[in-house]
Amino acid sequence: MTADAVTLAVALPLLAGFLSPALGRSSRTAAQWLGWAALAASAAVLWSVWVRLDGGTAAVAVGGFRPPLGIAFYLDGMALLFALAVPVVTLLFWPRAGTPQQFALTLVLAAAATGLALSGDIFNLYVFYELTAVASFGLVAAHEARRAQAAALRYLLLSAAGSVLLLAGIAVVYLRTGTLNLAHLATLAPERLQDPVGLAAFALMLLGLGVKAELFPVNGWVPEVYSSVSGRLAGLLAGLVSKLAVLVVVRALVLVFPRPEAAELMLVLGTLGIVVGELAAWRARDLRRQFAFSSIGQLGIVFVAFSVPGPAGIVAGLAVALHHLLTKPALFLLAERWGGAIEGLRGAGRGQWLASTLFILFALSLVGVPPLPGFWAKLLTVMSLMEQGTGPARAGAVVVMAATVVEAAYLFRTLGVLLARESGAESPQPHRGPDLATASLAGLILVGSVFALRPLGDGLKALAAQAVDVDGYVRTVLGGPGMAVSHPASQAPGGAGGGARVAHVPPEIAS
Amino acid sequence: MSLPPLEIVLYAGAVSLLIIGLAGLVMSEHLVRLVLALGVAEAGGNLLLVLTGFRQGAVAPILLGAAPSGPMVDPIPQALVLTAIVIGVGVQALALALVLRVRRAYGTVHMSALRARLVEDLDEAAGLPPEGSREAPGVERPV
Amino acid sequence: MTLLDGLWAASALTALVAAAFGRHPAAGSWLTVLYGLQFLVVAMMGGLSEGADPVPASVSFVVLGYGLAWQFSALSWFFAVITAGAALAAAWFVSGAWGRAYAARGGDLRLLQLALALNPLAMYVLLASTDFLSLFVGWELVSWSSFLLMLSGGGVGVRWALRYLVYAIGGAMAVMAAMAQAHALTGSFGFGALAAAVPELSAASLWMLVILLAAGFGVKMGLLPFHLWQAGAYAETPGPGAAFLGAISSRMGLYAMLLTLFGGLGLGTLQALHIPFTPLEAHELLAWIAAFTMVLPTFTALRQNDARWLLAWHGIGQGGYMLLGVAMGDALASAGGMMHVFNHATYQAALFMAVTAVVYRTGTADLNRLGGLVTRMPLTFLVLLIGIIGLAGLPPMNGFVSKWLIYRALIDEGQPLLFVAAVIGTLGTIVSVYKLLHNIFLGRLRVEHESVREVPWSMLTPMLALAAVVFVTGLAPGPVLDWVAAVQRELGFAVLVPTLGGVDRPDGGLDMLWVVGIMLAGFGVGALIFLAGGRARTVHQLDNYAGGHFLSAEVRYHYSDNFYAGLMHRIGSWYRGSFQWLQDALVSATDFLAQGAAGVYRAVQPVTWLLGVTVLALWWAW
Amino acid sequence: MRNFTSLLFAGGLGFFLLVLAADLPLGAPPMLAGQGVLAEGAAATGAANLVTAVVLAYRGIDTLGELSILFAAAAGVGLVLGRARRRPDAEADPEGGFILLAAADLLFPLLVIVGLYIVLHGHLTPGGGFQGGVVLAAAFFLPLLGRPRNALDHAVIGWIEGLAGAVFVGIGLWALAARGEFLAPLLGKGTLGALFSAGTLPLLYIAVGLKVGAEIAGLMSTLQETEAAGS
């Protein structure tokens, strides 16, 4: 199976999604199995490509049109890691009780998220971004309660406004450079985007993408949506979709806008997001909104970490993002179990020891208790910020640490209520089911990763070294070392040529 | 006094549409107006996008028999804008459907009222007394 | 497998047994044996205090390119032997009647046993730290295990435990900041690299490190103004847990300070670090913070009406003596400060156990509801008496030796103000521990306590053993001072060479053997006079006074009520709620900000934020 | 106050975007990728309409994404309004007048033919699957305006959109199997400008046309039915 097959990871869920509603009219079960099969196949394809690449990078010219004319998918460790996370997490958070339309939307969401991870073309990224947006509007609105529809409408308006800005940013970039391919942009950026106009374009794109990535202050939809929908959907949106939007921002930052000002903008907004998110979570009076605000804070930490230039920032950001990807969806599943006003949960955690233990485990890891992974992620973030040593970076580090105190205060206050000896008026009936199994799986992975810290750390470093290797990206996508592609027309052969070039970059393990 | 060059006029027009749309999104109360404002803003964005391929005195990028009679405009933004328009249509259709549904569920088409009702709904779903109330949590609110 | 591995294994085994069988009544004895095993392993490492090579752990990790390794040195061993002893005593206390009664009253005995077993384990990990990273890992483990111990009793304790948690995480974050800063400055987590880099560092970065480390570890020590969590958190922990925590837990802060500030940055650095516009240096700043920590909490203890709270407040104040001694830094003072760690652990554990024994029999620790128990619980009275003499720093108990060293050094160093502060602190201690003794054991026996009996031997044995240690190490402080000398050598302090009875110095030493001998002789004479003299006679109940306070018919009949009312009337207003305002201000500021944060999206529509921040970003892009 | 702030922000954004124009090469774009397409597009794809070459060949996966967005929007509308469809007792809109009915009948065949024409000539002239698809949708929707009581069969629409989408993906997969590249152009390129040219591009456009037509028609009829149901 060549690297070209990676397009299957996008195409198969789409195919299944297209057929799902029609098929679902006759057999809902068939539609469900079709979706599972497509996601499993997508995961298998990505896995086999990962194994084949073996730490190298590759570019796939979709349709065989050589970039920068055609659209290229870029495969490196970071892209494949997140792409692989998509079908796996989607399978875990599959809307079991849903209709065939919901299956279709979930599949489309998965395909689009995979595309976000892989694509190397800014307009193609925009299309996939919009596709995730529309699919998630539909999924949110599919929820029974009327509050879900109101939340979806407000989410849609905000997100669409952000998309207009994103589009304007893309237009500015295209006007300046005449290309949409990220690798080509990376070669042109030093001369064409190193000015206020480039910065403005980045700002527009950041805010546009920030809506999905829960960037402050364009995340007003987060508490409304997450507390309106089921824990599974909230987990999917908070865990997966937000990370992929962040990934796109990071790609743009590394390849196209490597100016310190751009990173600083991200740092400032991320820092404010931490402050607002964690403080609001402190005041939140119900579990769902507490987790929603906490998610805003966590994504703020992700942005702050990614704003540090160089591999250190990428390692820290990836660690925080992956940790959040693991814990927050599981917490939303637990919140689904208890739900409701925190004060009403007095003693609700007693007698549900597995769920309570998981809650404690996730809370400890979020707060950052060694040796749990959350501690290492936080340590990496703080260290990379301090290493950077600028004023805003230090302030960011201080805020990250102060937020930890606030987070510990509210998470354990909630735990104190859950495990209180005296029980509340009526303790909510726990519903058993696969939700707890999924959360347990996340807990097991979390604990298991404690024993694999060394390989994980080395792996992250390798990924980060690859991700910041702009030259490698350009070489892989456009071919030829340092080729100045100013007039691609003169050398582009017929569209039939090209195909995938697999450039085996030796895995760079930083010492 | 001569007119400014065409591309500047077009650019100004695109930006104006964008701004009018966004201002409408911020300032409007009526949900349908919000959707319309979104449409206007998207039109501005699309115009901006298609303008990126505009060349002075060039013709459409269609090869009709003979050799092209002059420089052609960039075909890529035209393709992009086609995509963007369709995306806009999809989003607006969904928005209108949501407006219809929300109007039926809440009986209001005003954004601020909707937001207040939504927050009440969220509190109620969580079993919380309304914000600022001194009541004990979980108590049934008088309707 | 090294002895350190053995210690960890024994401690982990204890925790596993506690987790598995903690609820079973018979498990208490087995656990006590296991704690004894831990103590034995620590004792086998005794060579560390005689200059033996450090004992490494055979496990080590490399995580994210940072090495994690552990080893025991003289410093670790000194704190570990205290930890192991305190844990053994506490476990012994739990093992018998007390544990059964605790479980019978609905307490979660398994949780308590588990928490009690995890605490020493975490401390052994912490004490084996070799660099900032392993220190931080151990530090967090200690914080969270003591959190668990505080929680284990439920009830009011949970609220205090949560408050402790917030303080502890705040402290840990300060440590993390210092650690990241040190790494940014030197490129490594090692203390050696930091010490080597000191000459090149600017005063500003040094100050930042000093303040972050002192504040971070000071939270655990209960230094002013971070002390507000400690009294409640320790006092509301179940009795033996409180004994263990009060004995050693907060001293981990001193250990970490010794390791980082005094061992890492170096005492010389602190002495050279000048505070602008003042005649003070950094170590004097620490000494003054320590002085305030001695005085204010001690006088707060005076106001307590709950025996456990009174002791817990004293624990904070005594921590001030330790830091004061170490911060002064000469041979006498640092030896006194470090020896006080040991001494405090012995008498504080004994005192908490004695109070817990009283609570076990009477059901209350309220000083206004007790009295006259000396006839009913004479051995407990003896333990408490020995304990408070130690706590007050009077001969012939060990507390006197360490405090004498500190006083002596303050005079030698020409610090009269600090000396006065130390004396005031001691005065407050004496006054308040008398209240403790008096209100529980002296005066009239209350009717409801007529049938109270002495506590069983399972509880008495550890108490009496600790009391014996308090006396013996007071009589012959030489061995403990030897251990301290090894620590001084390791950390680069001037070394105090002790004799068996104390210190021998040309300008006047201390020989406790003589002191105790003379005192006992004096007691003997006094006893002869007492026995030869008249009998006690009965007087009218108003023909009496206590605490400088004559009784009259108007005042309450039972005069242990509102003890020291007159004194408190005079001085109480000076320190009422000291630094409570700081905590309140922080909490309400956070609350206020949080209200704003929660309202961020309520004030305007989210789209407005989008538009506004876009404009700002574009403006900024220019 | 709120409006003032909003206007200020909007004005500020406009100001900055206009200032941006000074630094943008308006009217003379760099066209790095665009030149390439102009130079080789016709040869590589066989499409005379270079925009079509970009839409279906160079950026075929964009178009797939775009179709998916329409599909997702239609599915979303179906989910949102699905439960709120016409109540059996709801008053339907009255039937249209003579002019509307006659025009609908008259226009239906015309619209279908025009729509098909636009779809089929997408690779030659301006137009294509999207434009033609909308015209086709209008052809089917117009009679509904006249006769609100009739309804489109949503099952049929569902199958059409599902299968059309599957055909698009299927052609892409066929290319993957045959050429190793997803959505690569297949079949002979033919002569530039002929109806049967440009390989699989017209087939893709037919799929797009059907899918867009089905989706827009489905969307509009869902909205219309809901509106008919009243609130």
Image: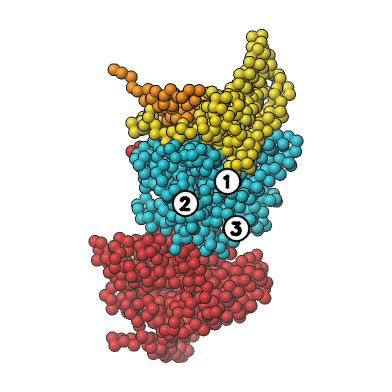
Chain colours: A cyan, B orange, C red, D yellow
Instruction: From this view, report whether residue C332 is shown above or below residue A244.
Output: below
Q: Exactly how many numbered labels are in the figure?
A: 3
Q: Answer few, some or many: residues within 10 Å of disc 3's Cα (few below 14, many 20 plus, some between 14 and 19).
A: few
Residue occupied by mark 1:
A4
Chain on which label 3 sits: A
Residue occupied by mark 2:
A467
Q: Amino acid at mark 2?
A: Ala
User: Which label is found at residue A445?
Assistant: 3
Residue at x 68%, y 46% (from the top left corner)? A37
| A409 on left or right of D115 | left
Q: CA distance from mark 2 to mark 3?
A: 25 Å
Numbered disc 2: secondary structure: helix
Q: Position of residue A161 (x, y in %)?
A: 48, 33
Instruction: Say which of C495 and B135 sits in front.
Output: C495
Q: Position of residue D79 (x, y in %)?
A: 65, 33
Numbered disc 3: secondary structure: helix
Q: Amino acid at mark 3?
A: Ile
Q: Do the residues bearing badges 3 and 1 touch, measured as CB atoms within 8 Å?
A: no
Q: Are marks 3 and 1 on the same chain?
A: yes
Instruction: From this view, report whether residue A490 is shown above or below residue B59.
Output: below
Q: Answer few, some or many: residues within 10 Å of disc 2's Cα (few below 14, many 20 plus, some between 14 and 19).
A: many
- Quick one: label 2 or label 3, which is nearer the N terminus? 3
Q: CA distance from mark 3 to mark 1?
A: 31 Å
Instruction: Say which of A493 and A174 sits in front.
Output: A493
Residue at x 33%, y 22% (from the top left corner)? B4
User: Which label is found at residue C195?
Assistant: none
Numbered disc 1: secondary structure: helix
Q: Position of residue C117 (x, y in %)?
A: 57, 71
For marks 2 and 3, give the one nearer the viewer. Answer: 2
Chain on which label 2 sits: A
Q: CA distance from mark 2 to mark 1?
A: 21 Å
